[in-house]
Amino acid sequence: MIKSFYKSNNRDFTIVHGDCFDVLPQFDFKFDMIFADPPYFLSNGGISCQAGKIVCVDKGEWDKGGSPESIMEFNRRWLSLCREKLKDNGTIWISGTHHNIFSIANVLTELGYKLLNVITWTKTNPPPNISCRFFTHSTEFIIWARKCKKIPHKYNYELMKAINGGKQMTDVWRLPAIGRWEKSCGKHPTQKPLALLTRIILASTDEHDWILDPFAGSSTTGIAANLCGRRYLGIEKVEQFTILSKNRRTELNNMDILFNYREKLSDLKLYLEKTEVQEPNSIYGGDLPF
């Protein structure tokens, strides 16, 4: 029996404490979209620079590397489970770097997904390269794929064009990494910016759609989903991050914080000017079986 760690009062945000490999097989509900930020397998003693200080990049046991074969099998397992949880017209977005994204692309093709785009996220404020022996890492990649090759997917083309100043949006997005204002409840070591998740959600879902994140972390996906009027299920195996997720969602009950977030997210601000979205505290129910 699945038990939610936290569920918002209007049931638009649910976080489950557990491993997605254990949780996903326990229910049959299907989602309109999935966003996944799986382990990059980089926690092997490397160093980086943050706020002018040299720091270790190790994130935790969940991010320690393995053999190419074990990493491939890990990706095959979770992508297979996620495919079963997508609606036939659903899409999945997966973030990564060169360390894991090629393995993921190969598995997606193997499992029958149709690759739509590979987004290049160009960071406006990347950390410096302290070794000075290669180019500074300033990008991450996000694969966008749909479940079925012959069933059309959702793409809000006109909205993306409007966000891009009336021109077709390309697959290169210039967006900052997380800002200080996004860490008000604490910080996850691989936290994604709300600007990135907001654009992804606005591009490929409609209001009230259900979004799944099998590696929820601090639930940036869920916060972005609720800001956009979508519903969310996150699964996270580290308890401290489920607590962080709960605290971040609880913050949105403060209308001043809610409006402040919306003002800072330019894509969302434009969308809200065109659409009347229900506030997160509005009761519109949830369909999850738990």
Image (cartoon, rainbow, N blue to C red):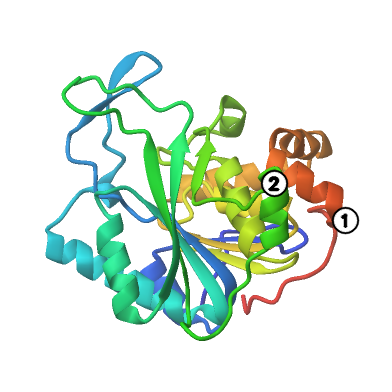
Q: Residue furthest top?
A: 52
Query: Is any part of residue 207 visible from this angle?
Result: yes
x and y percentages locating residue 280 in the rendered image: 78, 53
Residue 142 image-quadrant placement: bottom left
Q: Give the left or right position of residue 5, taking residue 145 as reference.
A: right
Asked if the residue under mark 2 is in contact with the one under mark 1, i.e. CB atoms within 8 Å, the reply is no
Tag 1: residue type? Glu
Determine which of the numbered discs, if any, sits on residue 276 in the image: 1
The mark total stands at 2
In the image, 107 versus 221, the foreground residue is: 107
Q: Residue furthest front?
A: 167
**Mark 2 lies on residue:** 163
In the image, 204 versus 81, the foreground residue is: 204
Q: Dot 2, how many residues are within 10 Å of its Cα: few (below 14), some (14-19), or many (20+)?
A: some
Query: Is any part of residue 17 visible from this angle?
Result: no
x and y percentages locating residue 50 in the rendered image: 37, 21
Q: Give the left or right position of residue 53, taking residue 14 as reference.
A: left
- Kindly report the distance in space between the C-alpha atoms of the residues bearing marks 1 and 2: 17 Å
Helix, strand or loop under label 2: helix
> With respect to residue 55, does 276 lie above or below?
below
